[in-house]
Amino acid sequence: MYIYNLLYNRYGDLGWWPAETPFEVAVGAILTQNTSWNNVELSIQNLKKKIDLNPEELLRLDIDELKLLIKPSGFYNQKAERLKIFSKFVSVEYSGDIKYLDRFKTSDARNILLSLKGIGKETADSILLYACEHPIFVIDKYTMRMFNRVGVGWPEKYDIFQKNIMKLLPHDLNIYRHYHALIVENSKNYCRSKPICEGCPIAKICKKTILNK
Ligand code: SF4
C-alpha cells in the first residue's frame, strides 16, 4: 500500500473509468486495445453522436458505419467485429444488461468474457473491475514497467503480476480501481519508456530511479 499511498497523495481520485454507463466502459475497454485513450475518446464521441450507446443500438448499426465511427481507435475492422460480438452476447444472454455479470463468481465471469472473440485478459479484467463490481486488478504494460523499475523483479507475465499485486493489497474494489488509474497517470507523467524520475512521487523508494545513479 506504500506505493499506492504515495501515488494517491499526489494525484487523488482520478475518477477512472470515465464513462456514463457500464456498457460504455466495456466499449472503451475494447477500443483501447493497442491505442491511446485520446483516440478512444474520439471514437466514443462519434458513436454517441450517432446512437444511444447500448448493445441493441450498436448491433443495429451498419458494420461499415461502425468501422468509420471507431476509425480513430485504429484496427477498426477487428474492433468493429469485436464490438458486434460483445453487443450480441450482452443483448442475447443478459437482455442488454452487462451488470448481469455481477451475479457470477469473479473467476466464472472472467471465463465467460475470455470465451468471447477478441476479449483478452486486460480487457476482461477492465470490464469486470470498472463496468461491474468485481474486485480484480487490471495489469497492463505500464504496471509491469513501473513495478519492475521500482524493483519487484517479477517476470512480465500477466497472471504472475496480477497474483503478486493482489496478494500485497486488501481485496478492495475501490483500491483496485484507483490504483490502476494512478499507475497509468504516473506512467504518462513520469514513468515513460524513457523515465523522467525527477518529481516522480515514488522516486524515493524506486530502485531504478535515475536520481540514484
Ligand atoms: S522514479 Fe523513475 S523509474 Fe521509478 S517509477 Fe518514477 S519515473 Fe519510473
Image (cartoon, helix red, strand yellow):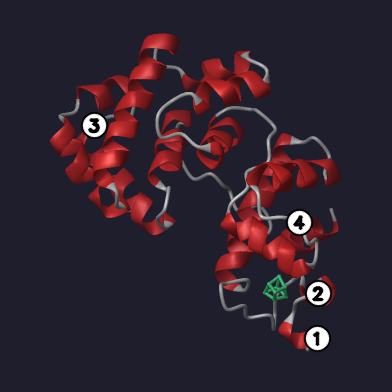
Q: Give the amino acid at mark 1.
A: Asn
Label placed on residue 154: 4
Residue placed most toward the observer, 77 or 13:
77
SS of the residue under disc 4:
loop
Residue 104 vs 153, above or below: the answer is above
Q: Classify residue 28 as left or right of residue 57.
A: right
Q: Give the amino acid at mark 4.
A: Trp
SS of the residue under disc 3:
loop
Mark 2 or mark 3, earlier in chain: 3
Q: Which residue is mark 1?
A: 212
Cα–Cα gap, marks 1 and 2: 8 Å
Residue placed most toward the observer, 77 or 6:
77
Is the residue marked by circle 2 packed among few (<14), some (14-19), or many (20+) residues within 10 Å? some
Cα–Cα gap, marks 3 and 1: 52 Å
Q: For residue 62, what is the image quadrant?
A: top left
Residue 84 vs 42, above or below: the answer is above
Is the residue marked by circle 1 packed among few (<14), some (14-19), or many (20+) residues within 10 Å? few
Label placed on residue 207: 2
Label placed on residue 130: none
Tell me whether circle 1 and circle 2 mark residues in contact (CB < 8 Å): yes
Is the residue marked by circle 3 packed among few (<14), some (14-19), or many (20+) residues within 10 Å? few
Residue placed most toward the observer, 10 or 96:
96
Where does residue 123 sit, x and y in percent of width and height?
A: 51, 39
Within 8 Å: ligand 1 and the Cβ of disc 2? yes
Mark 1 or mark 2, earlier in chain: 2
Label placed on residue 51: 3
Tell me whether circle 3 and circle 1 mark residues in contact (CB < 8 Å): no
Mark 4 or mark 3, earlier in chain: 3
Identify which residue is drawn at 74% across, 79% down. 209
Mark 3 or mark 1, earlier in chain: 3
Cα–Cα gap, marks 4 and 1: 21 Å
Where does residue 172 sit, x and y in percent of width and height?
A: 77, 36
